[in-house]
Image (cartoon, helix red, strand yellow):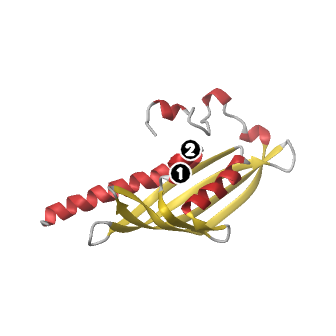
Amino acid sequence: MAELDLAVRDLLAKQAITEVVYTYCRALDRMDRDLALSVWHPGGTADYPPMFSGTGEGFVDWVWKAHEALTSHSHQITNILIQIGADGTSAVSESYVTVLLRGPGADDSAISEITTRGRYVDRWSLRDGRWAVDSRRHILDAQTVQTIPRELADFVPPEDAGRRDTDDPSYAVFRP
């Protein structure tokens, strides 16, 4: 393969992998389980020590229960570094992740907010024309837990807030 062809192949692979990384955040924040499952190849693994270790599908099941108990959550990915293997069908990546989780507080006057910062170290493969995760390891770099008075947390009118389902306004413009 010519040098330019290899460069184009690698750029296309990097873009496809980046889209899957972003899809993961969208899937969790919109509680779109099928979309979340599409991030992993069948049998792919997820290691989020010390909370979870198992298959990607098992992780989605586990995180779903945890997220259903929350009032809101938001995931962001930045600083994605990707290396494509020489064969063009394997890759590794590191992505920085920030997650904000809000849930019920000790009483009705407050909410609990957890902010975590960490990284996903992923191994990827291209199978049947689709890039997906073979294995993911989450590395926790920092975590903050705080209690917020409800009046400070609930300042967005419900009609302007994002939704945790496929009725979110973004689904009107993006196909899942």
**Residue sticking out furthest to the right:** 107
Nearest the viewer among 61 and 12 is 61
Who's the residue at 49% across and 55% down the image? 77
Who's the residue at 36% across and 68% down the image? 91
Residue 36, numbered label: 1
Residue 108 percent location from the top left of the image: 85, 42
Instruction: Provide the secondary structure element on which disc 2 rests.
Output: loop
Who's the residue at 69% across and 61% down the image? 144
Gap between marks 2 and 1, in whole Å?
6 Å
Residue 105 percent location from the top left of the image: 81, 49
Which amino acid lies under the numbered mark 2 shown in the image of this protein?
A: Asp
Nearest the viewer among 79 and 25 is 25
Nearest the viewer among 167 and 33 is 33
Q: Is residue 151 left or right of residue 51?
A: right
Check the picture and name the quadrant holding the N terminus. Answer: bottom left
Instruction: Provide the secondary structure element on which disc 1 rests.
Output: helix
Residue, disc 2: 32
Considering only vertical position in the picture, is 103 above or below 170? below
Which amino acid lies under the numbered mark 1 shown in the image of this protein?
A: Ala
Location of residue 52 by image quarter = bottom right
Q: Is residue 171 left or right of residue 111?
A: left
Location of residue 8 by image quarter = bottom left
Q: For the residues labelled 2 and 1, say whether their Cβ atoms are less than 8 Å apart.
A: yes
Q: Total marks drawn?
A: 2
